[in-house]
Amino acid sequence: MNVRTLAASLYLLVFLTACDGARQQQSILNPEGPRAESVHGLWLLMLILGSIVWILVTVATIVAVVRRRSREDVDQTTEGEDSYGATGEGPSWARSRGNKAQTLWIVAFAGAIVPAVVILIVTAVSTIVLRDIDPNEAGDGTVVEVTGHQYWWEVRYPGLDVITANEIHIPVGERVELQVNSSDVIHSFWVPELSGKMDMIPGRSNSIWLEADEPGIYWGQCSEYCGEQHAKMRFVVVAHQPEEFSGWISAQRETAEPPTLPTAKTDEPPLVEESEVLARGREVFMSSSCVYCHAINGTAAAGEAGPDLTHLASRETLAAGVLPNDRGNLAGWILNPQSIKPGALMPGTDLDGDELQALLTYLESLE
Ligand code: HEC
Ligand SMILES: [Cu+2]
């Protein structure tokens, strides 16, 4: 590869990263809530202090090297002495007492005083940040329980009878308490723009809080290696205005009614066909292996090994943030999840075209 190709590919890489960033930003450098802002401030302070120290050390090293060289030139002109003063008298520059005191002072300053001051500042600010992000400082409002599974997120709102997956809805401007744990191995909860990481440990509930300043979608990611599809264990946090949030909660509380005939306007032909397709789709679901692993509230399906599908169609993504939730992706996922997330804990299904279409129509009706 020549230099040009290398430069072009590097450019392309940076360019593509930027594209992805615009769509699914996961950057600690773009805090969107008070928790992430505190941590970002500390990070910035450490970056600035670290950079100053780095610049000082680099300059000092360069000066030392350059000065040493020029002294070597001078020393070499002195007869009977090599450049290191091997005759025992030491090089000319080290002979003066004033220089020694100066050297000692520089060593004390750069080696002890500056580091002590830097460490003190960083310790003080860290203590403030730790107090700011204390998990016990969550508000008294919304509580969300998040359970990590290989490779998806179960999300429950205790007391509200809401269960969903791979999506956490919160009201803006509120410190929402999250209780995180795991059903299998250690995962870690991380929404870079809203909050630092919190381990999710089987048999133990850890607390963290999230607050978003603005409504929007914030991407999250498992940040503790948990198996083959760890990288594809993503989720979204959706921050709403408070009224919208209550609307979302009440919609999620409804059970998935057995799909009924859509109320047709008087002059339109009745939509009997569509309803038959829905009924057929439900039957396909209920008579397949799906029911052993998935629950649909209001039906006989009550499996717990996979995400609750009661309001599947209201979700933004499929398979833990991996695919946009649309009919084509849903079909691809159901037929062959292993081609999308090899090692995911859902087997592929053999369905003929009609069965699949009916199943898709049924699943898409689960709003
Ligand atoms: C052995 C258990 C199992 C069976 C059987 C199973 N699934 Fe799954 N399903 C899972 C698991 C586990 C996931 C989560 C996979 C991931 O994201 O890593 C999943 C994910 C899904 C999702 C994505 C949900 C979301 O919100 O991201 C859909 C849709 C789905 N399954 C539908 C079905 C249908 C339809 C069937 C029957 C044809 C079925 N599944 C059979 C375990 C199963
Ligand atoms: Cu993981």
Image: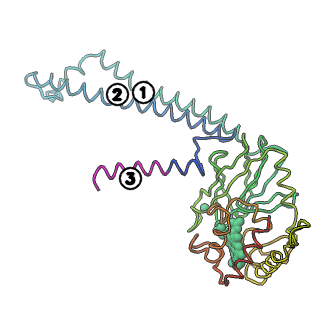
Q: Return the residue nearer the eye: 361 or 169.
A: 361
Inter-mark Cα distance, 1 to 2: 10 Å
Residue 323, position in %: x, y? Answer: 62, 63
Which mark is drawn over residue 131? none
Q: Earlier in the sequence, mark 1 or mark 2?
A: 2
Q: Amino acid at mark 1?
A: Ala
Q: Earlier in the sequence, mark 3 or mark 2?
A: 3
Q: Is residue 183 visible?
A: no
Q: Which residue is mark 2?
A: 60
Inter-mark Cα distance, 3 to 2: 36 Å
Q: Which residues are magenta?
A: 1-16
Q: Return the residue nearer the eye: 260 or 147.
A: 260
Q: How is the image coloured?
A: rainbow
Disc 3 and disc 2 in contact, CB within 8 angstroms: no
Residue found at the far front of this picture: 267
Residue 60, position in %: x, y? Answer: 34, 27
Q: Per the image, is 185 magenta?
A: no
Which mark is drawn over residue 9? 3
Q: Amino acid at mark 3?
A: Ser
Say which quarter of the image contains residue 225.
bottom right
Q: Identify whether 53 is placed above or below 211.
A: above
Q: Disc 1 vs disc 2: which is toward the camera?
A: 2
Residue 46, position in %: x, y? Answer: 53, 35
Q: Disc 3 vs disc 1: which is toward the camera?
A: 3
Instruction: Find ligand 1 in the image and state its quadrant.
Output: bottom right
Which residue sits at x=58%, y=70%? 340
Of the 4 image quadrants, the one containing the C terminus is bottom right
Disc 1 and disc 2 in contact, CB within 8 angstroms: yes
